[in-house]
């Protein structure tokens, strides 16, 4: 039996520039962190007592004979890719799916990590990130960028740079006290609205959502350097990080009609009026979690303004995906027994 623990990510700057269609031509970069909210994937071989050969529990339960019958596209494609059979898989998480925290990619990374461990093989963080990107973007044909899979796999506070040659993960070196101050000045609230990130990406690329967003994305990319300098230069005013979040959110809202809603806009303005220096909706847009940068003296006021929303305290984490339970199995596939 294998249990993996994989963190969710919070993206601050550069979101959208991690799309292959953009960074192959213009380059791309994001600043993001993982934090102490996780998804857990429990995998073992299915005991040979049932008339089905695979049991999968997520928001639904599937019991099927053939891997080809599996409805969940990521599970089906991952099992086919790694030649997995007779599997019992259970997924659970600290936070809801479709909420802008890269949950589907964290699941993909954690599942691949568990499958490799069950096969008795080690997969390093880059291999897991690369294969999760391939799984979601190529095999499952889901729209989106590359940052979520990389963040979930590597963990930590990073600048991830993209180019036609691939990507590079650069940990942001920041004084411990300054990093704690950043963490303490960030407040996260659940709006209650959930959506599929890939659906938002598609909506912004077609129909009424289709606009030329190259100029906005280029400016959002330029802000990554500015934000990184604020974090790493101890002489810089850390509050400028919050003000820059406000700037990048306003640019993000210009990149597609599905990024925000009137309800989200109203909630954001309430937070700003209550004292937040800046903030943004996490993920592709449309709903999920709002994060604000709030100086300590205004945090009670912001909590009161957001009293209709669920407040989610969190701490940064640095580990990325990991196997937290490993017990080797002496297991022979039913297919082998029948030969």
Image (cartoon, rainbow, N blue to C red):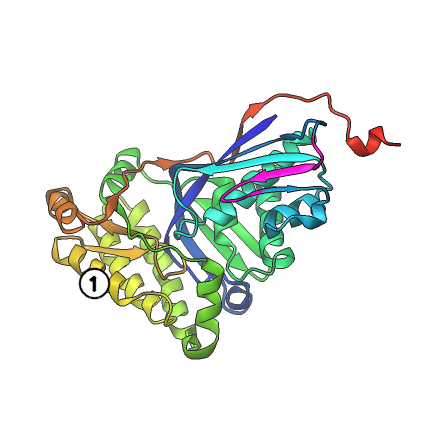
In which quarter of the view is residue 222 placed? bottom left
Which residue is painted at 73% across and 44% down in the image? 66
**Viewer can see residue 172:** no
Q: Is residue 84 above or below residue 229?
A: above
The image position of residue 3, as x and y in percent, is 55, 29
Image quarter in which the C terminus is found: top right
Q: What is the secondary structure assignment of the residue under circle 1?
A: helix
Judge by depth and name the residue closer to the eye, 56 or 243.
Answer: 56
Image quarter in which the N terminus is found: top right
- Tell me if 62 is positioned left or right of 59 in this view: right
In which quarter of the view is residue 25 placed? bottom right
Residue 272 falls within the magenta-colored stretch: no
Instruction: Count residues near mark 1 (Cα–Cα under 10 Å), then give few for <14, some for 14-19, many for 20+.
Output: few
Mark 1 lies on residue: 266
Which residue is painted at 58% across and 54% down in the image? 136
The image position of residue 179, as x and y in percent, is 29, 39
The image position of residue 240, as x and y in percent, is 22, 54
Q: Is residue 182 above or below residue 333?
A: below
Please state the extent of the stretch shown in magenta in the rendering.
50-61
**Viewer can see residue 145:** yes
Which residue is painted at 17% across and 53% down in the image? 276
């Amino acid at each position: 039996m294998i249990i993996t623990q994989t963190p969710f990510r919070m993206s601050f700057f550069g979101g959208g520039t991690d799309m292959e269609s953009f960074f192959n031509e213009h380059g791309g970069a994001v600043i993001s962190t993982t934090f102490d909210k996780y998804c857990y994937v429990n995998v073992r071989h299915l005991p040979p007592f049932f008339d089905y050969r695979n049991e999968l529990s997520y928001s639904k339960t599937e019991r099927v004979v053939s891997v080809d019958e599996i409805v969940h596209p990521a599970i089906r494609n991952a099992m086919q890719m790694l030649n997995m059979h007779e599997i019992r898989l259970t997924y659970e998480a600290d936070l809801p799916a479709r909420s802008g925290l890269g949950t589907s990619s964290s699941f993909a990374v954690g599942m691949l990590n568990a499958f490799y461990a069950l096969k008795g093989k080690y997969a390093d963080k880059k291999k897991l990130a690369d294969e999760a990107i391939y799984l979601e973007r190529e095999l499952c044909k889901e729209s989106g960028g590359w940052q979520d899979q990389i963040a979930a796999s590597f963990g930590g506070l990073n600048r991830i740079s993209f180019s036609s040659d691939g990507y590079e993960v650069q940990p942001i070196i920041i004084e411990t006290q300054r990093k704690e101050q950043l963490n303490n000045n960030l407040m996260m609230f659940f709006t209650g609205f959930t959506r599929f990130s890939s659906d938002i990406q598609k909506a912004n690329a077609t129909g009424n959502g289709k606009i030329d967003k190259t100029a906005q994305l280029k400016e959002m990319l330029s802000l990554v350097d500015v934000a990184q300098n604020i974090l790493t230069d101890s002489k810089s005013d850390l509050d400028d990080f919050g003000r820059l979040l406000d700037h990048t959110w306003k640019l993000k809202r210009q990149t597609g009609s599905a990024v925000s809603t009137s309800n989200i806009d109203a909630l954001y303005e309430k937070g700003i009026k209550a004292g937040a220096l800046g903030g943004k909706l996490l993920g592709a847009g449309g709903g999920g979690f709002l994060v604000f940068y709030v100086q300590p003296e205004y945090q009670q006021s912001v909590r009161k303004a957001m009293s209709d929303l669920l407040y989610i305290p969190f701490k940064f984490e640095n580990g990325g995906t990991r196997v937290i339970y490993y017990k080797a199995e002496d297991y022979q596939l039913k297919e082998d027994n029948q030969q």
